[in-house]
Amino acid sequence: MKELERVTFQRAVHPHMISGHLQGSLLRMITAMIAPRNVLEIGTFTGYSTLSIASALGDGAVIDTIEANDEMQEISRPFFERSPYGGHIRQHIGSALDIAPILGKQYDLVFIDGGKREYPDYYRMIMGDGAYSSGMPLIAGGGFILADNILWYGKVANPSCRDADTMAITAFNTMVANDPRIENIIIPLRDGLNLIRVK
Ligand SMILES: C[S@@+](CC[C@H](N)C(=O)[O-])C[C@H]1O[C@@H](n2cnc3c(N)ncnc32)[C@H](O)[C@@H]1O
């Protein structure tokens, strides 16, 4: 994981997007607690969060991870292949909004860490609503959704921040807070994670 972090900082254009050790440890812990059979990740980037989650998966459990930028797999794939947890990982290239609905699966855990402006669409798709939904929720009853960067460097609490990313994350947080189908708690670790349980 240290090597992956170093290579990410050497080769990726926005290396700060990596989850890193602290958040990676939280992802591993949460995965171990939930013991999911199927995990969906939106936004593989260089694969740090994928490997953190995969390291806590039990026999036969799978993480489908989707990344829109095909260049990222030049970094992530060799690390997945070398990892003892690589057998749990199914890598997909393209937009999660196109790919996730056609995988035909329901997930016990979804990690949202893709394009910030798409967070409301990811949530609708996962819950089985909206234009990108296949009509079936992608999250199983009793499943968990974990969404990263929901404090967006504190901008969500600053009314003068009205850029598209901040507005979309605020819309996502509001959508979650008002949805009677779920309960949630914001974990103020790093850039904030919204932990959502589908009732
Ligand atoms: C913050 S990074 C992910 C970091 C990664 N989860 C980690 O912890 O190391 C966000 C990634 O989402 C990808 N992305 C943006 N829109 C996407 C989409 N619609 N579907 C899949 N990936 C997307 C970006 O290319 C970028 O690599």
Image (spheres, helix red, strand yellow):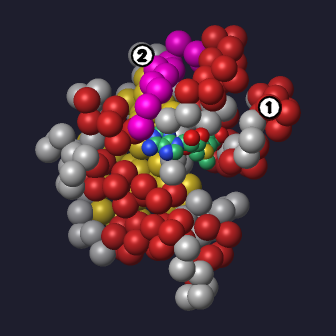
Q: In whole angstroms, how far apart are the C-alphas of marks 2 and 1? A: 33 Å
- Asked if one can make out residue 195 in the rendered structure from this viewpoint, the answer is no
- Mark 2 or 1: the one toward you: 1
Q: Quadrant of residue 196?
A: bottom left
Question: Residue 28, which numbered label?
Answer: none
Q: Position of residue 14 (x, y in %)?
A: 73, 46
Q: Which residue is mark 1?
A: 11
Residues marked 2 and 1 touching at CB (< 8 Å): no
- Asked if one can make out residue 184 in the rendered structure from this viewpoint, the answer is yes
Q: Residues within 10 Å of mark 2 (few under 14, many from 20)?
A: few
Q: Which residue is mark 2?
A: 60
Of marks 2 and 1, which one's residue comes earlier in the chain? 1
Up-down relation of residue 159 to residue 18 (above or below): below
- Residue 86, magenta (yes or no): yes
- Range of residues picked out in magenta: 85-95
Element assignment for label 2? loop
In the depicted view, which residue is nearer to us: 149 or 30? Answer: 149
